Amino acid sequence: MKITVPIRISVAVLLTLSHRTVAQSAGRPPLRWGGDAEGGAPFVEADPADPSKVRGFDVEIARMIAHGLGREPQFVQVQWSSIEQSLERGDFDVGMSGLEDRPELRARHSVSIPYFEFREVLAVRTADSARYRTLSDLRGKRVGTLGATTAYQILLGARDSLGLIPISYDDDVHPYADLVAGRVDAVLLDNIIADRSHRRLPGFVVQPAPVATGHYVAVFPLANGAERDSADAILRARMRDGSLEKVFRAWNVWDDEQAKYLQRATAAAPEQGATTNPGSTAGSSAATYLPALLRAAGITLLLSCLSMLLAVSVGVCIAAGRVYGAPFVRALLTVYVEAVRGTPVLLQLFVIYYGLSGVVRLPAFAAAVLGLGLNYAAYESEIYRSALEAIARPQLEAARTLGLSEFQILRLVRGPQALRLALAPMTNDFVALLKDSSLVSVITVVELTKQTAIYATNIGSWVVPGLLCALAYLALSLPLSHFARRLERRWSAA
């Protein structure tokens, strides 16, 4: 009886508390938290058993915070680089997905106490492990990382001081694949990401000496400091009772350094500082980013011109083949046109850059020109074919009666008239290609839109960067449209 009564009382108390928590959760809105399941484990990933659900240590921590607030967590999928902007829009209540504690983040949002300490580590190919131990060993070399991260800011600082070349990626998988393939000489990223990639992809090593240390945090709207304070209290309690350690052990991210950090965090009530970031030169003014935007605009223009030149050259050949070629040639070219027009250009870029790397290892810029050029060649060929077939048959018959060969008819009669008909849609295609060039950032080409996204992420707003980017695109496209209209008027008057 001495044992049974306390147990019964404890069970009754637990049931009462459980019902009270459920009642509180049922009466309050869910805690919407934003994260990116594309980032994968151990942060956030789709549950293989039920892809409609997510799992990861950030998922567990979000659940802890939500239950501590008497609410139920509700996951909102958002691209990692857009979490801060989406939080400001009110798309969710808190952002959590391996978000790094940075000074500029604290200036714009209510940031929780750090709940995890990571290390920025350098990964190099196994054969280069003795040569490249630190960033200073990588003078003039290409170093990859995620864009708009602390690691990227470190590389930007090292670019000026050491002359290394930062390569920005949109995900954390392809940097290591490119490292093994020899496209970059090193990768600088969080030790969590480096260890995960190392388990999946052989051929590189992670140097033990960290370049910097940082922390993951939860981010609340700036006006919601009260809820951030409540979350801080919940996180401290979960640190003290071992709940966080249990979660990190379950996801294999627990080590001695993390144990030391949690000991320091529970012993000191004040918030931890932001990421140790040697060499960061982040600026927030438009003047600071303007040179980078102008360089990116130049890359966009060059890329678009070369791609359009390729598209026109190949498109003319395809159109001529479909009009004058043998049945087999026409059928083959038709398959090409339909296959290219029926699949996304983004997929084609991935196939050319990554899929064919085992056969031919193209530089990123060359792959971008080839991908955009071959894609638009299919559309250009349809414009030219339609223009060629629009020429009146009596003109062609008259030319044949005069003894002109088919090539002479094409060069002297059919071609010039078809060019006049095709000029307007050609101009439209070039403007469209100019805008589609923004897609090549997925294969590490930092063009205008990508540089704008980096600028917007660093300052926490799309207003000024978006306006500058729009003005740059207009400055590139409007003169071309004006020139094409003048040319059309001159030819129509002739």
Image: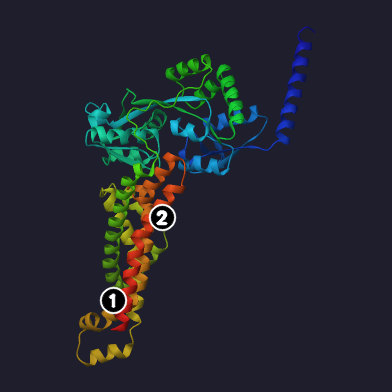
x then y, percent, for residue 398:
26, 92
The residue that disc 1 covers is 326
Badge 1 marks a residue whose secondary structure is: loop
Which quadrant of the structure image shows residue 232?
top right
x then y, percent, for residue 391:
33, 84
Distance of mark 1 from mark 2, alpha carbons? 46 Å
In the displayed structure, 29 sits above or below 272; it is: below
The foreground one among 39 and 478 is 478
x then y, percent, for residue 337:
36, 66
Q: Quadrant of the C terminus?
A: bottom left
Q: What is the three-letter code of the residue carrying label 1?
A: Ala
Q: What residue lies at 45% left-to-right and 31% top-to-bottom?
A: 100
x then y, percent, for residue 469:
39, 52
| Mark sitting earlier along the chain (1/2) | 1
In the displayed structure, 466 sits above or below 124; it is: below
The residue that disc 2 covers is 470
Q: What is the three-letter code of the residue carrying label 2?
A: Ala
